Amino acid sequence: MDIRTAVFNAARDGKLRLMQRLLRDKPTSEVRALVGEKTSGSTPLLAASRYGHLDVVLYLLEHCRADIELGGSVSFDGETIEGAPPLWAASAAGHLSVVKALLSHGASVNNTTLTNSTPLRAACFDGHLDIVKYLVEHHADLEVANRHGHTCLMIACYKGHRDIARYLLERGADVNRKSVKGNTALHDCAESGSLEIMKLLLKYKALMEKDGYGMTPLMAASVTCHTNIVEFLIHNPQTVKEERIDALELLGATFVDKKRDLLTALRYWKKAMDMRHSDRTNVIRKPESQNLIPAYDYAREVTTLEELDALIADPDEMRTQALLIRERVLGPSHPDTSYYIRYRGAVYADSGNFERCIKLWKYALDMQQTHLDPLSPMTASSLLSFAELFSFMLQDRAKGLLGTVVAFADLLGILTKSVHEIERGLKHVAQAGVVADREHSPFHKALCIILHLVCLLEKVACDDEQDVMKKRTVHRLVRLDPRGRNSYGPLHLAVDKETTAVGRYPVCKFPSAVVAELLLECGADMEARDSEGNTVLHIAAQNNHPDIMNVLLAAGAHFDMVNDAHRAPFDLLSEKEIAKNLVLPFMHMTLQCLAARAIVSHKIECRGHVPVQLEAFVQLH
């Protein structure tokens, strides 16, 4: 173990004497360098602050002159927080003595993590009232919001910390401050189910406003099934009758899908129905359905008490009613709408009714692609669910279940929608003018899912016309030239073993020669390079797949193109694979290539002495 790691471990474990022995007789410059180094993303001071070792913190500050603001990575409940300064870590962990020491040594009380979370917000999150008070008394800003626009008051309400919420309100926290998505502390309180805090917020003049999805706190309580909040707010003078009705109907739908409690759902639906007819001179009727939805088997919402009573004899119809209500009340742009459609489809899949599942999932996917941002996590999740379902249906263990035949049209339809999602994402990036976004993880995830769908499609029999349709779709993808992490294109991913791990359940195994061959047939560029200059042949070599290398070489891949580290694909194969003689270099070398490599290895300047086309050829080597 090197001394840097030993110093870090001593700080993390609170072993002051060991640390003193390690740093004894070291020059000041070396000591400062050692305590400034990061191990697993964290400095010794950050680790000592996280675990509350006051004596180590004081030693690092006073004797080692550690940087008091240097942030790093810390973990809480399995989640890693990046860029956390020591004061943030001590506040989150509840170490008041360390918080006092850091502030007395000049720590900035409002220094934030990479997500703009302050030490005060960290203390509010875990309910450390003593630290909250101390930070506020030392000029912590109550209104600094994180990257989502969530304030300290909002997080205290969401976590149900009543005393902290009261203290923040007493100190002047803005009770009606809105987040990026338009929710207020009342929304967070409604979602947490704390009626006491709800009453406290209303006492401080909190307004019943709508968030970015058009949801009021009453509606937020309905979708989270907090009946105490719903029962309280339907009597609040800030709510109108129509909203009370919608909230009760939505609460019933939540009991159907979230609690699986059909009797309670029916009770709330009846209460809403009574409220609709409470004034016979002004009955509030449900809007007429203009277009009946095939995914719901053309069902309509019930409109009378008699129809409601009849539902209890047909649980499946009751579940469909819940979907209809949620879509009407929340609208198609709310994430819960498509989420519960997918959930209902999954229930059908579990019972072997794959046809009904696919119908519902397609409807949810269309909804997401119409109303959500391109490459949203929810859309990616839908596409992955299709890949996992089709994979299961194609496996032997699904034989004998209802509807296990995978229709070519279904699989191709989802592949087409997946490629469309890439098109949407590229268009969005082009409009935003951010080229780097092409390589961010949403593209990578979507591309991996697409390759699994392509792999599955190759397992389904098709006629000549369907084969043409399949290749046109893959050609559309190739022509877009989408890139994932490390600037991997589809062909790079097809020959990379990491592509296998796309979700929780196995779908297809990569590298895949079948997928690579189809991409090549549809025009994929074999000489495309990733961010480190690797061609597809390099990636196949890194994965020790000489069989796929031979496929690529047979298709015309250039064997001795070098990457940014000046290594050719053959250089990346393991000695074990080379020994098998499955890839023979001399079979793919030309005199032209050997001459180019000789020029490069001897550092001969050829510019101006050979044609321009040959200059480019030499540079490849």
Image (cartoon, rainbow, N blue to C red):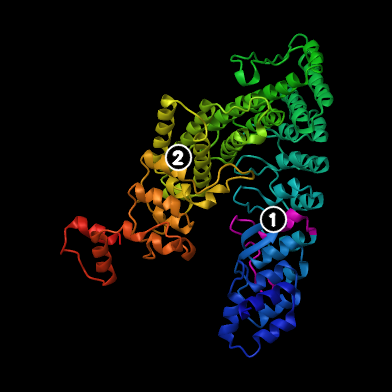
> Does 572 sit above or below residue 314?
below
Asked if residue 175 can be seen in this view, the reply is yes
Judge by depth and name the residue closer to the eye, 126 or 20: 20
Judge by depth and name the residue closer to the eye, 354 or 531: 354
Left or right: 286 with respect to 522? right
At x 83% / y 35%, what residue is drawn? Answer: 228
Asked if residue 205 can be seen in this view, the reply is no
Residue 317, by quadrant, is: top right
At x 77% / y 67%, what residue is drawn? Answer: 96
Amino acid marked by disc 1: Arg
Amino acid marked by disc 2: His
Q: Position of residue 186 (x, y in %)?
A: 72, 40
Q: Which mark is residue 121?
A: 1
Name the N-terminal-most of marks 2 and 1.
1
Specify start and end residues of the magenta stretch as a single range.
Answer: 102-129
User: Which residue in the rendered view is the most extreme toward the top?
Assistant: 281
Q: Which mark is residue 380?
A: none
Left or right: 496 with respect to 9? left
Q: Is residue 5 magenta?
A: no
> How far is the residue under mark 2 from the one under mark 1?
33 Å
Q: Position of residue 53 (x, y in %)?
A: 75, 73
Q: Is residue 112 magenta?
A: yes
Mark 1 packing: few (<14 Cα in 10 Å), some, or many (20+)? many
Q: Quadrant of the C terminus?
A: bottom left
* Mark 2 element type: helix
Q: Which residue is mark 2?
A: 428
Judge by depth and name the residue closer to the eye, 556 or 175: 556
> Does 564 sit above or below residue 179?
below
Q: Position of residue 130 (x, y in %)?
A: 79, 61
